Image (tube, rainbow, N blue to C red):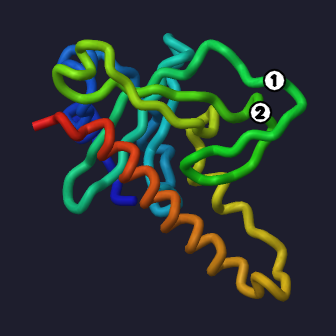
Amino acid sequence: MKPLSADDIRQCIVNASRGEALRMPLPGLHEVIWEQREYLGWRDPRAPLRGYLVHWVGDRPVGIVLRASSGRMSPGIAAMCSLCRTTQPSDQVRLYTAPLAGQAGRDGSTIGAYICADLACSLMIRIMPPPSAVQPDPAAVVTARAEGLLERVRSFTADVAKTAG
């Protein structure tokens, strides 16, 4: 992923007002290892159910605001993130909804997906699998995971942004 500036992030949010984007807290951008990310995702420390996701589409960043469900899945079961497709304990995956861009979102229309609760899919996919007869090259597995993650992130944000002009 190419690095993002605070201005890049604030200007690319497609499903929030300009004022909301200006008030949004940003993560420590100087700490991000950009080459090990497909997207930048973070939670709002002041509003624990709010999250943000930003990635590049060609030469421009696209970002969305997310809201985590206040309800939790049943404990003791496994759940799968729809972005990184990692299976984890259910308390580590949350249902996130995103208001649609434009008037549809202002009218309350949303789209949702089960996503890693900490929005750290880029870290999850980089856990190297052990070599096996089926997957002899762990680095190739991570590369394929990264490509799949980015494709699903782009699809999700494109669905949110469809009405944005």
Q: Which residue matches tag 2?
A: 90
Residue located at (17% from left, 20% from top): 103
Determine which residue is flagged by label 1. 74
| Quadrant of the snapshot with the N terminus | bottom left
| Image spot of residue 17 (x, y percent) | 20, 19
- Residue at image point 34% right, 53% down: 3
SS of the residue at dot 1? Answer: loop
Q: Is residue 57 above or below residue 145?
A: above
Drawn side of residue 44 relative to residue 20, left or right: right
Q: Viewed as shown, does residue 85 lie left or right of 5?
A: right
Total residue callouts: 2
Query: Which amino acid, mark 1?
Result: Ser
Task: Bin the neighbour count of mark 1 within 10 Å (Cα to Cα): few under 14, some 14-19, many 20 and up.
Answer: few
Amino acid at the residue labelled 2 = Ser
From this view, report whether residue 161 is shown above or below residue 20: below
Asked which quadrant contains residue 127, the reply is bottom right
Proximity of marks 2 and 1: CB atoms separated by less than 8 Å = yes
Question: Mark 2 or 1 closer to N-term?
Answer: 1
Q: Judging from the image, what secondary structure is the residue with disc 2 in?
A: helix
- Neighbor class of circle 2 (other Cα within 10 Å; few <14, some 14-19, many 20+) is some
* Residue 48 image position (x, y, % from top left): 56, 15
In the drawing, does residue 145 fall left or right of residue 31?
A: right
Question: Which residue is depicted at the point 37% across and 51% down?
Answer: 155
Residue 8, position as x, y percentages in the image: 23, 41
